[in-house]
Structures are given as C-alpha cells and as structure tokens.
Image (cartoon, rainbow, N blue to C red):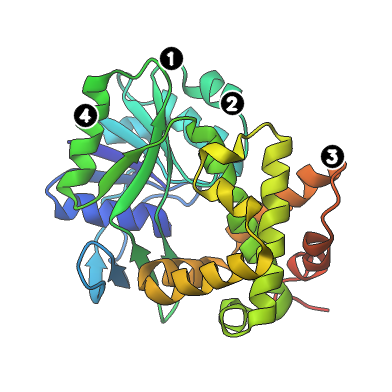
Amino acid sequence: MRLLIIGLGAVGCAYGHALREAGHDVVHLPRRRPAGARAAVRFRLLDGRRAPAEGRSVSYQPEVVATPKDAGPVDLALLAVRTADFRLAADRVRALPGQPLALVLGEWWSDRAMLDEHLGERGWLLGRPEAGGRLGTEESLLALRPTLTLGEQPAIGPATRARVTELFASGGIATRWQPEAIHALWLHHAITGAIGGAAHRVGGFDALLADTGHRRECAVCIREALAVCAARSVPLERFEEGHLAFAPAPLLADHLAALWTADPVTRAITRLRALDADARACFDDVWLAARRLGLQTPALDRCRPHVAAPPGAAA
C-alpha cells in the first residue's frame, strides 16, 4: 500500500518506520515545516513487537513531500496530529487526488461532528496511538506497542476494516476494533491529562512512580478526569479504562505501579509523554471541561499551577 502520513513527530515516525519496514510505500507531509531534503531521523526504538521488548538503534530516512499533490494517489492518509492541528491536516487530506480513507491517529477530545464535517465524504477511522517518544534531542527515543486501538464510522465496511487490519498486521501490530471509539479516546485523553498533571506537580514521572503517596494522588486525578468523561455522557462501565473510576485510590495506585513496572514499553511511553506539550494540552482540555460542567476537581486543581508553569519555565 501507498501511505501518506501527515506529521513527522514521534507517532508519525514510529508508524512510518514500522510500515516501511514491512514493505509499504510511505511518504510524509509535515504539519507546518517546509518540506525539502531531510537528513535521516535517528532514534532508539523500544520495540514492543519483540519479546522481550527490545531497544535498538534506528535510522529512518523519511520521504517528504511539499504538498498533497506531490504525494500522488495514496491508499490511506494517516493524520498523526493533535486535535489543534486537525483542521489543517484535514484540509490537506481533502486536497489529495481521489478520496483515500483517512485515519486520525492522535489525542482526541472533540466530538464526531468535527470528523464528519471535515472527512465525512471520504470515510474516516479514528485511532489511539500506542506509540510515543521524543525526537530532536541527543537522547531521541521512541516506544512502540504491538497493538493499536481503532474505531470507524458506520459507513466503513468489513472489506475496508480487513484491509486496515492486514496493513498493520504486516508491521507486527495487532488492531483492536473498539465500538464507540470516540468515547474510548476521550477516556484515554482524560487519563493522559491526569497523569501529566500529577507528574508536573511532583517534578516528573520518575518521582510519581517512586512514591506511593504521589501515585495515590495521581489515582485521584484519574478518577476526577474520568468523572469529567462521565459528565460528557461516556458510559464508563462499558470500557476497561472506565472501570478505573470506581477503584479506590490505594488500589488504583497499586495497579499503576504494577502496570508501569511490568510493561517497559508502556512505562517508557508514559515517562516520555508525562511532561510534554501534548500531556499539558490533555490536562487543560479536561480541567476546562470540568469548569464548564461545574464539577469539583480538587486534585486536578492542585496540579493546575504546575501544568501552567511547566518544569524549566521562567518564574
């Protein structure tokens, strides 16, 4: 298959590398930076597709195009962008020749109407990226899990679903098709924001992992964030993540410690993302939604000043 990935960050490079390695034709259209000749993107990949998870050095040479027209006909457009960049990315998808299927792969806090408005005529999939990392530093590191959660609009037929499943399976990534995908992504968005807020408050993910009291405060943040989702009409009981809202804080804190200790890929993704701009944006979305809905969120409120002034910011 020929794929266009809009985005050249951690998620775009992780999936671009995996799918090109599987033999697919992958091109990138950066979100904002001008295209042109690019040096190889070098990073260390913590690869959950291998058991045990293996860290290896990767040199990924992205093929970059300047405009949607330069990409030519593609079978799938993968939008590896945050919600704030979605409209620009969707405009670029609409400019592609033909009407390729669009897969929106990123944090999502908006409703379905935005997807239908910008992509409805061509069909869309919505997915939760199970990859993350940091590029552009001396210690560039990406982590990739062997699974990917996807959901689709009703117009997507079984043949398209099978084709997408086969695509990612060729790269060693098993797809999990989730009913009510938008609600599933809201839950993930809320949890990401809650963990990010708690990590900002204590100075980073490692401090969060090391201290039982910090993890319990993080657990309370998660429960409050999930309460925001419930107020947005998410049926928490239908989702595995939603059940966290009903767990006592000490039990949830122990669950987090066990998860992060046992799964090095999940731990790496969480550590790398805890203090980044995406986590701060997730926190802000959830916190502001709580204010609009009139919810009391004392644990999130305690995190708010630290997220507003992230580590390293001027006083």
Q: Mark 4 is on which residue type?
A: Ala
Near mark 2 (Cα within 10 A), the count class, few <14, some 14-19 or many ≥20, is few
Q: Nearer the viewer, residue 118 or 56?
A: 56
Q: Which mark is drawn over residue 162?
A: 4
Q: Position of residue 280 (x, y in %)?
A: 66, 60
Near mark 1 (Cα within 10 A), the count class, few <14, some 14-19 or many ≥20, is few
**Cβ–Cβ below 8 Å for labels 2 and 1?**
no
What SS does tag 3 mark? helix
Q: CA distance from mark 2 to mark 3?
A: 20 Å
Instruction: Name the quadrant containing residue 50.
Output: bottom left
Q: Which mark is drawn over residue 29?
A: none
Q: Position of residue 244 (x, y in %)?
A: 59, 54
Counting residues from the N terminus, which is met first, the one under dot 2 or under dot 3?
A: 2
Q: Nearer the viewer, residue 17 or 53?
A: 53
Q: Mark 2 is on which residue type?
A: Met
Q: Which mark is drawn over residue 121?
A: 1
Q: Which mark is drawn over residue 292?
A: 3
Foreground tag (2 vs 3)? 3
Say whether residue 314 is left or right of residue 45. right
Q: Which residue is mark 2?
A: 114
What residue appears at the point 38 percent right and 15 percent down from the top-left corner?
A: 155
Q: Is residue 71 visible?
A: yes
